[in-house]
Image (cartoon, coloured by chain):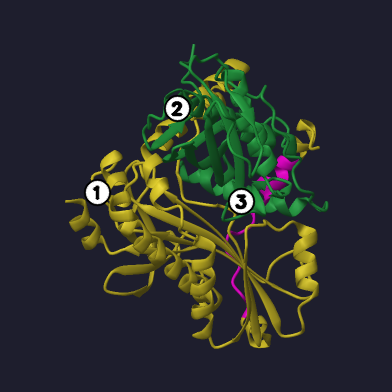
Chain colours: A yellow, B green
Amino acid sequence: MLKPRFLLLLLPLVLGACASPLRINLASEQRAKLNEVQAKIIVVQDEVIAAVQPSMISMATGGGLLMAAIDSSITNSRVQAAQKVMGRFYAEIEDVDYRKEFNAAMQQELQKYPIRPGSVVTTPRGLNRQELQQAVDKLEPGQALLVIMPRYFLSMDFRNLDAEAWVTIWTKGDTNAPVHRGVIYYQSQPVGPGGPASMEQWADKKATRFRSVLRESIAELSRLAVMEVDVVAEPPKREEARKFGFSTGAGQIEIAGNLVHETADRVLVLGTDGKLYSLPRPQDAKVAQR
Amino acid sequence: MNRKLQIALLCALPTLAGAATDERQPLDMQYDAKMREVPQEHLDGLCHVRVTVKDERQNKETVGLSFRGALLTTDMRTWVANGLSDLRNFGAEVDTEEGVPLPAGGGVAVEASLTRAYIWQVGFKIFSMVALKARFSNGNGLIQEKYYRAHGDKTNMWGADSEYVDTLNYGMNNLVPVMAQDLVSLCRGVPVEQYSYAGPPEKKPK
């Protein structure tokens, strides 16, 4: 069992992970050596959850049991409120199989990729280092393991479906660090005015809208995951970047980045934060908000 | 969620999962009636209840992820059956016989299907979700089908596997009182609403 003291010892490790660059681009010489990509998609979640911001009063006030108890109570209330709103919606989406759909989308996407696709495995089991090492040890020269770890959630205001995934690529020989690491992020068009009214729209007609948007999110994440491997550009510097609208669930902000690709509905942006985003086109977002 | 915090949590998860190297074992899914915030209250009008359980989770392999790796499970039928057997503490007579008729005095058969059981984390809190579909019938046939969802919560103290089991027990123990209340009507053959959600009782911060 992990003792609290041990957890504290792990803290620098946690912070250390974030101190290293978020994005590691696959080097072109590494890329040239690859002739097959195997994909492992780790989907821990069994269904969509609502993004709930944990209360952090104790952090802001320097800790203490009373503050921690207040945090706990506030976080509980927020989760409880979100769950109450989402209740009936869950009954409508019970048959949705995110893992199955992701697997199919990834198989399809890898077919378009210039490197030969290998196996595509989707699992709910998070990998620990030993399991990752075993998977990498099985690779042949020229093979790479693409690990995708998505999570997906409805925003706090229930207007957007967001999906984010860690993407890493591993080759035989060294599991201390991946040869590629990136984060990809999908945000849907906003739905409804927010709150229970948006939830009703997601749930309406056996959650038709939700199912369609979820499929879009899977297709986009699959596309971004494969693009990740080929995006060799470094993230732009803030002063060179453009601004793109992004909903946090509590309001609208702008993220800085460069336009990588655009379609009729969406823009693909490499952010200054190193993430590769698929965002709804701003004008569409405005129409949907009306 | 605050974006900086989101990034910190995202950074933390793979690192900590990566730090664990032990061979993961399935959770010891023991039902525990003590892990509760909603008291067991005797209800008048409860009858004989026969509980049978199916495990129809889409994902029967895990209930989530902790800092130590995947939270593995095996068949959870016994855990659900033991949880629903707690209906006896609300005043029902409960059995888990299969393939035999209900007792001559009547009663209600509950065919419960576990459709979801998982945990997720928000900050330092662990939350659990337990979802059941229940098919209620009596000597006259089907009374109704109903969908239950309940969540439980617990502060993550040690990251121990037992804490995740406790949190699932909190979820189950929020669900059972709702079913007990429903059975007061169902024992008379009267249907109840088709969906219920239950969470921990609301507490106001002092």
> Which amino acid is tagged 3?
Cys
User: Image point 25% across, 57% down: which residue?
Assistant: A285
Can you see residue A124? yes
**Residue identifier under label 2:** B182
Q: Which residues are magenta?
A: A10-27
Which residue lies most toward the front here?
A: B104
**Residue A158 x, y percent position in the rendering:** 34, 45
> Which amino acid is tagged 2?
Asp
The disc placed on residue B89 is: none
At numbered mark 2, what does the secondary structure look like: helix, strand or loop? helix
Find out whether residue A20 is within the magenta segment.
yes
Marks 1 and 3: same chain?
no
User: Image point 54% across, 63% down: which residue?
Assistant: A99
**Residue identifier under label 3:** B11
> Which amino acid is tagged 1?
Gly
**Residue identifier under label 1:** A192
**Residue B195 x, y percent position in the rendering:** 40, 37
At numbered mark 1, what does the secondary structure look like: helix, strand or loop? loop
